């Protein structure tokens, strides 16, 4: 987990593109498990159609891994895995609650906020600290470096 100074540096990149307060993106990342024992296949085969281990990975835009869970059976989804992710829990519960950033109000005035957030896709619970963005393909690599980190192919995220 980044310290407060490292976090502020990470957040600058997101602020420059209008995503003030973001600290990174998070996604479940499946890695094929070619030697999965036959007796465990049913819990490891998910939407991919083959046995995988899934890791909940949080990364900054420059692809620095901020957090990675242990591997879970691939049939589990983001909503299940995030319950066991200490980093996501700490972000939601205010680990960085003293980190400030400034938003612009409707009147153009400054609004001080605290507690950065993570960009996630629609597979996560709607909770504080995790913000779902429906994005087009042109933004995918920018907003989802968690997928790009591991070379996961995609054209759009919905």
Image: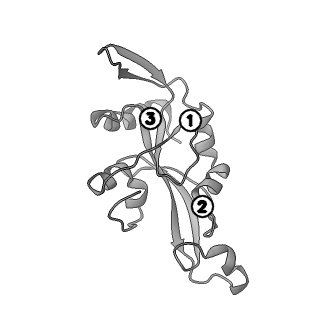
> What is the C-alpha distance between the residues marked 1 and 2?
19 Å
**Quadrant of residue 89 within the rendered picture:** top right
Q: Which residue is mark 1?
A: 128
What whole-number distance in Å separates the C-alpha atoms at marks 2 and 3?
28 Å
Which comes before the other along the chain, label 1 or label 2? 2
- Coordinates of residue 131 in the picture (x, y in percent): 48, 41
> In the rendering, at what x and y percent does residue 37 appear?
68, 84
Which residue corresponds to mark 2?
77
Residue denoted by label 3 = 7
Q: Is residue 116 shown above or below 156?
A: above
* Residue at the spot 63% in from the left edge and 33% down from the top edge: 93
Q: Secondary structure at mark 3?
A: helix
Q: CA distance from mark 3 to mark 1?
A: 18 Å
Query: Relative to 2, is 44 on the left or the right?
Result: right
Residue nearest the observer in this picture, 5 or 148: 148
Q: Is residue 4 left or right of residue 106?
A: right
Q: Is residue 108 above or below residue 81?
A: above
- Disc with the residue nearer the chain's start (2 vs 3): 3
Q: Secondary structure at mark 1?
A: loop
Q: Classify residue 91 by image quadrant.
A: top right
**Front label number (2 vs 3):** 2
């Amino acid at each position: 987990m980044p310290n407060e100074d490292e976090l502020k540096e990470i957040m600058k990149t997101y602020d420059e593109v209008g995503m003030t307060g973001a600290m990174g993106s998070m996604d479940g990342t499946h890695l094929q498990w070619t030697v999965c024992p036959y007796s465990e296949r049913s819990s490891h085969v998910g939407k991919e159609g083959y046995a995988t281990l899934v890791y909940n990975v949080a990364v900054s835009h420059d692809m620095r891994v901020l957090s990675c869970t242990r591997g879970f059976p691939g049939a589990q989804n983001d909503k299940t895995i995030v319950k066991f992710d200490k980093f996501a829990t700490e972000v939601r519960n205010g680990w960085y609650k003293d980190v400030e950033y400034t938003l612009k109000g409707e009147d153009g005035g400054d609004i001080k906020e605290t507690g950065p957030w993570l960009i996630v896709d629609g597979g996560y619970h709607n909770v504080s600290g995790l913000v779902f963005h429906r994005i087009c393909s042109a933004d995918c690599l920018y907003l989802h470096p968690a997928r790009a980190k591991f070379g996961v192919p995609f054209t759009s995220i919905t």
